[in-house]
Amino acid sequence: MSGLLDVGARALMANQVALQTAGHNISNVNVVGYSRQNVVLDPVQGQFTGGGYIGKGVSVTTVLRNHDELLTRQAAAAQAVQAGDAVRSQRLLQLQNIFQGGTQGLGASVNDMLNSLGDVVSSPTDITARMVSLTRMDEMAARMRSSAQQLQELGYAVDQQLASDMDHVNTLAKNIAAVNEQIASARGNGQTPNDLLDKRDQLIRELNQYVQTTQIPADDGTMGVFVGGSQALVLGNVAASLSVRESQTFPGSGQRALYFTPPGGKPIEMSTDLLGGGEVTGLMRFANTDLTDAGNMLGRMALGIGQTLNAQQAHGLTLDGAAGGPLFSVPTSMPGHSSNPATAGTVTFNDPSAFAASDYEVRFTSPPAGVVVRLSDNKVTSVADFTTGQVIDGLNFQFTAAGAAGERVLFKPFSSAAGSIQALVKSPRDLAAANPINAAMGTTNTGTLQLAGLQVGAGFVAPPPGDTASPPTYPGGIQLRFTAAGTFDVLSRGSNPPATVATGQSYVPGQSIAVNGWSITLQGTPQVGDTVNVGNAADPQYGDWFTRDAGNAKALMNLRDTRLFDDSTMADGYASLMAQVGTRTQSALYAAQVSGQIADNLEASRTAVSGVNLDEEASKLIQYQQAYQTSAKVLQIAQNIFDNLISVISR
């Protein structure tokens, strides 16, 4: 009789556990990271009798969770990549919004500034036209500064998000260590704590949203969590910490780096190349690469425009006959960033048309020799001696003291140009609209020569002045004297008699003639003996003609077609910047879409194994309910038999 009771009791308890497990599954159907659990039932070893083995019922061996370790790890890694791609694409969209087109964009202000010089060319004595041009220059500089400020604010927002992410990472690491300790303790009874394992797996998945990890299980049931390939963020019940701050490789550079701090140890700077995916990696990639590149493109634009316009302004004359002062404040040099303050290096700006929007790294190999690496594309240029200077991409790298072998110095030549640019000329009289030279046809010319253009450019050398005697014995200046319809000689009239500078020069109508950094364009057919005299515009012999001349204003306006930015003109430089940022943004959005699809597919595969199916659990409830009721019936029958037996015996 006791055997039947034992069988019924065991069956009742086993089915009760099965019902409880199914209910547990149903109640946790919406819990993120929960893995479906199943009861493992085994028959109790039968009792041997002369008639064979008689069954003794069923027992609960264990409760297992449906879990695939490989899918779980693959899903976590894919989610890390997706998180990094997603946050980078979001920040790039914000970056793209800074560089907008239209009338309110930076490109429009550059074109408005250059086009406004057309009114000065048409009417060089019009103070209003000059004032409008200066106002447009001030507006352009203000938009440059505004764009640079928005980049700084975006960088600040990224730093705040990184700091918040670090708090989450360190909290999750501590929680994983605490759960590890609970699991190790629970494993002492020989059974697996399913809910604790689910909790730990979910914490690891959440951690991978911020920084990609690898996991190695230990014999005691704990899980080691590693970042950067080999740094133990969690080992057993002990957690290390992570932080983000400026890289110590290049102090003062503003580059972000991830630091690993072991318990009781010192921070270790980690290589970003080893971090894999995660939101932290995506943000650091955006800050150190995308945001830096955008700042370099904007800074190169500000520096290129400012330096080019300043150079042309310096060639002209103001309404008061003085040489033009700088139109914009732009840096003339930038220091390098090194962990060794004794290594003094600077970069100066030589040729704006050769500037590349990039940071540069100097690496000393056998001092004073080394290499310069352009970080935008890793192009390497060897330098024999840095103490004598080396011009690369229009930049002159110069060191007063060479670094030690293996030492590295970071240069950020364009980092501050846009944020500090200012329009310096405030008085319309100080706009150097006039050419510093004047040209006139000889009074005895018999041909049809006419002046078509006169312009001063780089390398300008002023024509020699005349003497101060009254009357002068020589007038000064340069004379073009035609010896035939197609040839001429160049004479210097800075002495008496004039000195011959060049002979037999070719003349083609409409083709510019270059002399000492200035050029003159003539039309018509000369006769032998015809002359063209070119002299200093401020010489008394020309009176106040320079006040009515706009040759330099025209040269300033024509700079809009100068090739400055990767073969783009000054007027089109902003469009090129927008295109590069837009292309990068679209590429990041596509990468985020692809990695998101991969992560979703892997998560769906993991959920198919571990997720709770309510229909399946409902059918199990019915199955276990019927088994429970039947088990209870077995007990009832056993009780009836026992009662009948007692009744018979008592008689």
Image: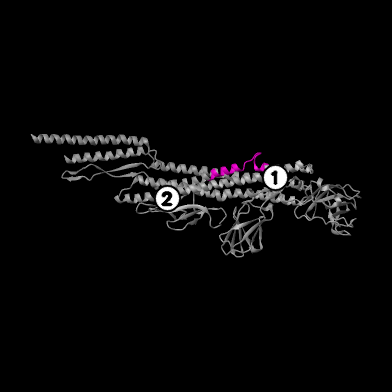
Where is residue 90? Give x, y as percent.
54, 43
Look at label 1 and name its amino acid.
Met
The residues colored magenta run: 88-108
Graded by Cα atoms within 10 Å as few (under 14), some (14 to 19) or many (20 or more), the crowding at tag 1 reads many
* Residue 379 in sight in this render: no
Q: Count the marks: how many? A: 2
Principal secondary structure, stretch drawn in magenta: helix
Graded by Cα atoms within 10 Å as few (under 14), some (14 to 19) or many (20 or more), the crowding at tag 2 reads many
Question: Which of the two marks, 1 or 2, is nearer to us in this view?
Answer: 1
Look at label 2 and name its amino acid.
Ala
Asked if residue 92 is among those painted magenta in the image, a careful observer would answer yes
Q: Residue furthest left?
A: 651
Q: Residue at x 62, y 57 (%)?
A: 335
Where is residue 559? Give x, y as percent.
73, 47
Q: CA distance from mark 1 to mark 2?
A: 54 Å
* Residue 146 drawn above or below residue 360: above
Q: Secondary structure at mark 1?
A: helix
Locate residue 89: give its quadrant: top right
Where is residue 368? Give x, y as percent.
62, 65
Locate residue 62: give its quadrant: top left
Q: Nearer the viewer, residue 59 or 245?
A: 245
Q: Nearer the viewer, residue 396 or 607?
A: 396
Q: Residue at x 24, y 38 (%)?
A: 12
- The quarter of the rendered structure image containing the N terminus is top left
Asked if residue 194 is among those painted magenta in the image, a careful observer would answer no
Name the side, left or right, on which 261 lies relative to 104: left
Q: Is tag 1's residue or tag 2's residue first in the polypeptide sequence?
A: 1
- The quarter of the rendered structure image containing the C terminus is top left
* Residue 173, numbered circle: 2
For disc 1, the marked residue is 137
Where is residue 419? Give x, y as percent.
63, 48
Name the side, left or right, on which 103 lies relative to 185: right
